[in-house]
Amino acid sequence: MMQVEKGETTSIWAFFIKCLIPLGLILLVAGSSSCSPGAYPIPVFKVAPETYSLERLLSDYEQDPAAAAARHEGKMYLFPSVDIDYVLSPSLTPLEYNLGGMPQFRSGPVVFKPQYLYDLDRLAPGFVVDVYGEVRGWIQKDFHIVNCTFAIAKGGDMPPPGAY
């Protein structure tokens, strides 16, 4: 049988305690923080995105739907000062969400689908947001903008805690 000297065993334990345990703790903390709702990135642009108003976009589609679809669909725009009329999210409207409603917020006929689900937790009707998203166009009676990220320009009143 091979005998291990006491000095070798001590150095293995010292390595384990000094290196592997702190590394494991760092990985645990880093992994758990990436799942938190606040960990989603805020968009940063090297070049300012093209700004387009919702009214102008809807007007383009009303005047010439085919030309507007060819020009806008698939493009990313920054839509400033969007008034939120309705929010469907797991925390604000859990019943609708649990019945299969797709997470979104609306402004008139426009449906905004978020890139990150938990971003909707910070919103309520009456908020004004600047939205960066990709134009999809009309789908049935709704105009869709997808992969949205946003910044709150003006807050509104969140419902009382018992409401969600």
Image (tube, rainbow, N blue to C red):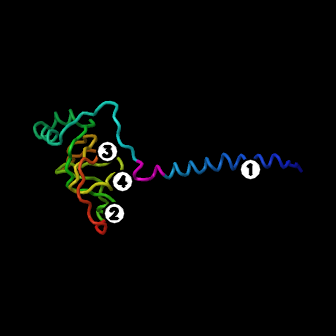
Q: Residues within 10 Å of mark 1 (few under 14, many from 20)?
A: few
Magenta range is 33-39
Question: Disc 4 marks which amino acid?
Answer: Tyr
Name the amino acid, label 3: Thr
Name the amino acid, label 1. Trp
Dot 2 falls on a residue whose secondary structure is: helix
Residue 121 in the magenta stretch? The answer is no
Tag of residue 13: 1
Q: Which of marks 3 and 2 is in front?
A: 3
| SS label for mark 1 | helix
35 magenta-colored: yes
How far apart are the two marked residues, 1 and 4, measured between alpha carbons? 43 Å
Which dot, 1 or 3, sits closer to the camera? Answer: 1
Q: Do the residues labelled 4 and 3 touch (CB within 8 Å)?
A: no
Q: Where is residue 146 in the image (x, y as percent from the top left)?
A: 29, 45
Q: Residues within 10 Å of mark 4 (few under 14, many from 20)?
A: some
Left or right, residue 13 beside residue 29: right
Residue 1 x, y percent position in the rendering: 89, 51
